[in-house]
């Protein structure tokens, strides 16, 4: 196990009815901005719970943070926040609202354009933020990362801000989610874990078992989460699984990949495809293309997650790859670029972007433009 430092300051407040605690969790003297997405929280009752919990408090609302939050929208929120002298942010929504709010938190204390923060890759100072999670997928409620789009140039990049001070997770907020959103959230969670697990074997028994526990849980609950989205126990497992999948826990002392995510971000930037849907496509190409590099972990994953323990190593790997793709298809998601009408033009553009940025992703640092092309061609 390699050297590491682990620090996660987010207070996790989990369970039914916990939104009512908001008034006691945010200091009384703070000027609050509450950020929202498109309005589903008004239909499912979450908005009323938040407003009632903050009755009598000084807050302003900002609506309209879109899926794949754009810097164009977030600039407006930053301007409003500066005008109202906001010094505490509350994100009410899923990963996109939380990611966007992380940039607002940085932008409120920055004199230049917010996109400069994104391109730097990190924020030096931020206003405190907290979250009320309403869509589980990204783990943004308990990590410091965020991904922001710039629509005018069709770009999408990650940056690191600060961890939420606290996050409220009430599984009942997931009850009204559309089936496709749940499917994409399950996909996102599964691939988050694979990006930290499917790398170099023999680094940490403990991290492997923690990661495998999350993978097993997602596989087990996925059919019920899609068929019975109002089952509190099932949605509790899903909600917490998504949070634990990307809160730095299972990454302690092990190498990480993230090439699939970087390629997926480009597909979203160029085509608007939901993040979890891009991952369901790209991960299969990544595992096929880098199968020799990941051989040891593929064999371990196949045996421990899918029960594939017989046959030659090549046969076991082939069956493991097939079972993985079958899992994403069971969620109702595409697993090939052609199913989304994506072809050579996009592959060439992603290759060009990777080359122009000089990137080398993956645990071995070997996913450059040429390798990204090979991965995407394996997804056709």
Image (cartoon, rainbow, N blue to C red):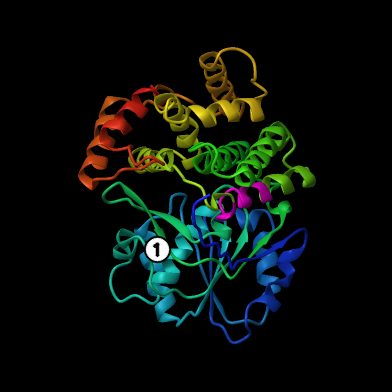
In this rendering, the answer to whether 266 lies above or below 131 is above
**Nearest the eye: 158 or 171:** 158
Q: Is residue 327 magenta?
A: no
Magenta residues span 240-249
Left or right placement of residue 349 versus residue 133 in this view:
left
Question: Hey, which quadrant is residue 365 in on the image?
Answer: top left
Q: Is residue 323 visible?
A: yes
Structural crowding at the residue carrying mark 1, measured as other residues with C-alpha within 10 Å and reported as few (<14), some (14–19) or many (≥20): many
Q: Residue at x 68, y 51 (%)?
A: 240
For the stretch drawn in magenta, what is the main secondary structure? helix
Q: Is residue 134 left or right of residue 4?
A: right
Nearest the eye: 27 or 194: 194
**Quarter of the rendering containing residue 90:** bottom right
Q: Nearer the viewer, residue 356 or 111?
A: 356
- Position of residue 86 relative to residue 15, above or below, is below
Quarter holding the C terminus is top left
For disc 1, the marked residue is 74
Find out whether residue 242 is within the magenta segment: yes
- Compared across the picture, whether 376 is left or right of 294 comes to left
Residue 61's place in the image compared with 352, above or below, is below
Is label 1 in a helix, a strand or a loop? helix
Splitting the image into 4 quarters, where does residue 132 fall? Answer: bottom right
Residue 346 screen position, x and y as percent = 29, 32
Q: How many marks?
A: 1
Residue in the image at 46% along x and 53% along y: 66
Q: Position of residue 216 (x, y in %)?
A: 68, 35
What's the residue at 53%, 28% (across, down)?
A: 298
Q: Residue 228: x, y in percent?
A: 75, 37
In the figure, is residue 362 to the left or right of 329? left
């Amino acid at each position: 196990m390699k050297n590491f430092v682990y620090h996660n300051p987010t207070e996790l407040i989990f369970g039914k009815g916990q939104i009512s605690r908001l008034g006691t969790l945010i200091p009384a003297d703070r000027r609050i901005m509450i950020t929202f997405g498109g309005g589903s929280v008004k239909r499912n009752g979450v908005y009323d719970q938040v407003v009632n919990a903050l009755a009598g408090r000084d807050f302003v609302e900002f609506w309209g943070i879109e899926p794949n939050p754009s810097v164009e929208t977030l600039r407006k929120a930053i301007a409003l926040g500066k005008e109202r002298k906001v010094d505490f942010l509350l994100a009410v929504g899923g990963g996109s609202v939380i990611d966007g709010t992380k940039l607002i938190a940085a932008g409120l204390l920055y004199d230049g354009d917010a996109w400069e923060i994104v391109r730097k890759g990190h924020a030096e100072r931020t206003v405190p933020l907290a979250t009320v999670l309403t869509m589980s997928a990204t783990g943004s409620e308990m990590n410091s990362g965020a991904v922001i789009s710039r629509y005018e140039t069709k770009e999408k990049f990650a940056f690191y801000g600060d961890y939420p001070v606290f996050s409220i997770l009430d599984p009942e907020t997931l009850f009204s989610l559309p089936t496709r959103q749940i499917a994409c959230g399950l996909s996102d969670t599964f691939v988050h874990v694979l990006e930290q697990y499917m790398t170099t074997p023999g680094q940490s028994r403990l991290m492997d078992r923690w990661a495998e526990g999350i993978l097993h849980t997602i596989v087990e609950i996925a059919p019920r989460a899609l068929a019975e989205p109002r089952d509190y126990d099932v949605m509790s497992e899903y909600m917490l699984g998504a949070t634990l999948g990307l809160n730095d826990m299972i990454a302690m002392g092990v190498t990480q990949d993230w090439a699939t995510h970087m390629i997926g971000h480009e597909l979203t930037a160029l085509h608007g495809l939901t993040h979890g849907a891009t991952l369901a496509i790209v991960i299969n190409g990544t595992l096929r293309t880098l199968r020799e590099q990941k051989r040891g972990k593929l064999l371990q994953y196949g045996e421990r997650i899918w029960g594939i323990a017989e046959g030659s190593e090549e046969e076991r790997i082939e069956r493991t790859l097939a079972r993985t793709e079958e899992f994403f298809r069971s969620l109702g998601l595409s697993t090939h670029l052609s199913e989304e009408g994506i072809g050579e033009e996009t592959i060439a553009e992603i290759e060009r972007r990777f080359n122009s940025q000089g990137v080398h992703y993956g645990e071995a640092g070997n996913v450059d433009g040429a390798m990204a092309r090979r991965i995407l061609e394996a997804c056709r």
